[in-house]
Image: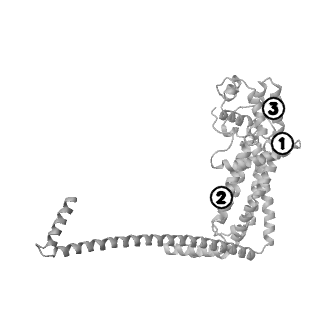
Amino acid sequence: MELLLATQQSGILMPFAWILGKILEAIYFIFSSIGIESIGLCIIVFTVVIRMLMLPSTIKQQKFSKLNSVMNPEIQAIQKKYKNKVDQASQLAQQEEIKAVYDKYGVSPTGSCLQLLIQMPIILALYRVIMNIPAYVSSVKDYYLTILQNMNGSQIKEFFTYKVDSFSDLTTQQVNNCIDVMSGYNRATLKVDGFSLSKLVDTIDSSVVDKAYDHIHNINNFFCYNLSDSPSQMLKAGLPIILVLLIPVLAGLTQFLSVTLSMKLNSAATNTQDNPMAGSMKMMNIMMPLMSVYMCYMFASGIGIYWVTSSAAMMIQQIFINMHLKKMDVNEIIEKNKEKAEQKRIARNEKNGVYREQVLKAASTNTKSVSSKANSTKSFAEKEKIIEEAKMKNMKKKNGSIGSRVNMVNDFNERNKK
């Protein structure tokens, strides 16, 4: 068995996961301070809080979808107009006409994509935090650490394959890896088969370990589920199939309802026959729920709780946002978008104007410098010319004269100096 993952998320998602982890830890601290220690409850509240923080971005995305339903017929008409024209001039004309439509409604062609790009790292980091809660909630991690600290070298070797004499010989990375396995939240990712925390605890004769294990069992218990176990593990353990499949089926169902609702709210933009996105949206409506069912069956049940809560929260947000947007006049939204677009254009032009002035100033300075050098060169050339003319005059003096002889002496001296 080879342990590869660090406890906390690394890479580009690390700062997002760290911030979200602090929020989750604060939620856990608030509940534990009033005597409630429940991972399931923390996951639900945490997911709702993050969805609320993402609400402004979601509203912008819904506004774009509403305007897109109005713009789409015009864009499709332009695309139909240039359907069989593949020459460069026609393609450029099509792009210009489509751009004019976006300008008309005061939106950017990348508006929806930008909101998705903003949300994507947050959603992925949120998933990673839920995937490994002990890494981000120190109080939960301490329970697992207590068990690990009371293990001897042979027990560590048996359960984690690390050849050490005692806990103190483990590196920080190895400790984190052991807790990854013990917590069970990313056990499937680590491909650790057959691990059982209860079996591990049975090999340790310590009341401290028993107490820590009881805490772990209590905080992971959510109704009849142990959130650190996956439904696939529950099925192998002999739990009724109805209970085992409840969370994965709920995850798939809520995902299906969420996607269906989203398509219904944007039906004007997606139901036209000429819209190439209509087919892909229908396919996504089938594939995403199936993917949800599979992932929530294979991973820890805590992931399933997150998935169900996230989809349910998204549906509620979509309903209320759509009710709000229905009260708003489309023309009013368009005018506001135009004003914002105009303000951005003015700011961009002002910025470009400042840059242009800087370029012109630099060019003027360079021109003066070049002119100064040219004048300096010209002045030097004029001096050389005067000297040469003086020499010529001296040479024109009569041979044999005193001046001629003086010049000959000067020329001789100049040659000897070189």
**Residue designated by label 3:** 213
Tag 1 or tag 3, which sits nearer the N-term? 1
Rendered location of residue 101, percent (x, y): 63, 75
Crowding around mark 3 (Cα neighbors within 10 Å: few <14, some 14 to 19, many 20+) is some
Q: Residue at x 83, y 42 (%)?
A: 38
Question: Helix, strand or loop at disc 1?
Answer: loop
Amino acid type for the residue under numbered disc 3? Tyr
Distance CA(mark 3)–CA(mark 1): 14 Å
Q: Quadrant of residue 55?
A: bottom right
Question: Helix, strand or loop at disc 3?
Answer: helix
Q: Which residue is nearer to you in this view: 418 or 230?
A: 418
Question: Helix, strand or loop at disc 2?
Answer: helix
What label does residue 38 carry, if any?
1
Distance CA(mark 1)–CA(mark 2): 32 Å
What label does residue 117 carry, if any?
2
Crowding around mark 1 (Cα neighbors within 10 Å: few <14, some 14 to 19, many 20+) is some
Q: Which residue is nearer to you in this view: 299 or 29?
A: 29
Distance CA(mark 2)–CA(mark 3): 41 Å
Direction from residue 338 to residue 301 in the image, left or right: right
Amino acid type for the residue under numbered disc 1? Ser
Tell which residue pokes out farthest to the right in this image. Answer: 34
Q: Which residue is nearer to you in this view: 303 or 295?
A: 303
Tell which residue pokes out farthest to the left in this image. Answer: 400
Rendered location of residue 184, percent (x, y): 73, 37
Taking 375 as reference, is 139 above or below it?
A: above
Rendered location of residue 399, percent (x, y): 11, 73
Q: Residue at x 72, y 46 (%)?
A: 129
Tag 3 or tag 2, which sits nearer the N-term? 2
Crowding around mark 2 (Cα neighbors within 10 Å: few <14, some 14 to 19, many 20+) is few
Q: Residue at x 79, y 71 (%)?
A: 326
